[in-house]
Amino acid sequence: MTTKIFLIRHAEAEGNLFRAAHGQYDSVVTPQGYRQLAYLRRRFQGERLDAVYGSDLTRTRATASALYVPRGLPFRPMPLLREIRLGIWEQMTWGEIQRLDRRMYIDFNKRPDLWRVEGAETFAQVRDRTLAAIRRIAAENPGGTAAAASHGAALRTLLGTLEGMSLEEIGRTGHGDNTAVSLLEADGDKIRVVFRDDASHLPDRLSTFRRQSWHRDDAATEPGLWFRTLREDGGGRTAEALLDGQTAGRIGTSLEPGALRVTDCEILPALRGRGYGVQLLGQAVQYARSRGRERLVLSCPPELAGYFARYGFVKAGDAMVMDLRRVVREIPELDTIPK
């Protein structure tokens, strides 16, 4: 009796956008991610699903909601499907990780069998728990069809293992884009990969990978920023952004009741339009959450309002405000998605 299991990588989340290491850190789906989910929902129209699972993190539950909400199904959280625990790397920028430990950074992408970081899982542990999750899903849905939302490194490890690869061999495989779909068929103890990492439902403008280059590089080189604190006290924080040891910009913030206000956000003119500016916002978001703030507030000239709106800010009086609460939002209909 064959059971079909669709595996879905979560939609674009803050770690993907801000280029930060979010393993089991509970980040949220970005506005671009919710646009991706509208297309994921359309892809599964007409597909019978008996159950929808996902890791218990917010970004995977939001992704799974594109499938369980239209069908009136319950969500079945499964911590076994979580992303790899990154230990001391959690919440660091990938640029900083590459600066501090380039060898281990490369191993994370290219030699997962060798990767070891303080406080982190090994890829062998991720392999074993995700395999256990899939066997449990298959046992709970004999002859049925289930879907499960998980994470990039976890799915890459699981799929490669099911294709008969060692961890070393998995390091030579590609990565799945956000909302990429894979299909398994389970029959007794046998589990077969029918296809993997298919993101053909996404238009090019919504592909996360289309805007990034790290996954195309043999060494997975991350052209990311790292940050040095210039000032931090009870009133806020100012940090310098650096690229290859040179100043690239600055992000300044001040603490307000319930909010963090961005007082300074600048990327050098020569680096604009290359995806670095949003990494400054990532530092502000991370700092706001660490200080228990639920809103990020900034003022900007009218010509920049569209830029900040793209990343989740909405107009509120004379300011732009981003809601930082970890909630699963409504997925837009295709005809309401901004071009």
Image (cartoon, rainbow, N blue to C red):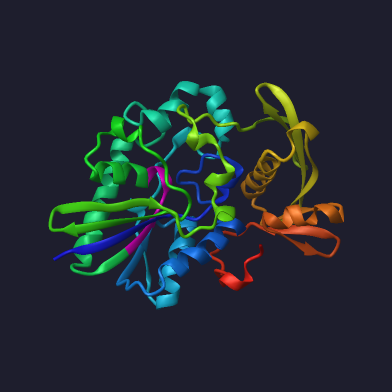
Q: Nearer the viewer, residue 269 or 94?
A: 269
Horizontally, residue 8 falls left or right of residue 234, namely left
**Which residue sits furthest bottom?**
72
Does residue 337 appear in the picture of this structure? Answer: yes
Residue 35 inside the magenta-drawn segment: no
Residue at image point 59% right, 44% down: 211
Direction from residue 162 to residue 39 in the image, left or right: right
* Residue for point 25% across, 34% down: 166
Residue 84 on image: x %, y % = 39, 42
Q: Is 148 inside the magenta-drawn segment?
A: yes
304 to the left or right of 12: right
Question: Is the residue 104 above or below the residue 2 in the image?
Answer: above
The part of the chain drawn in magenta is 147-154
Which image quarter: residue 115?
Answer: top left
Q: Which quadrant does the N terminus fall into?
A: bottom left
Residue in the picture at 36% in, 37% down = 173
> Which residue is depicted at the point 40% across and 27% down?
107
Number of residue marks: 0
The reply to whether residue 299 is in sight is no
Question: What percent of the width, then of the height, locates residue 47?
Answer: 35, 72
Residue 336 position, x and y percent, is 63, 71
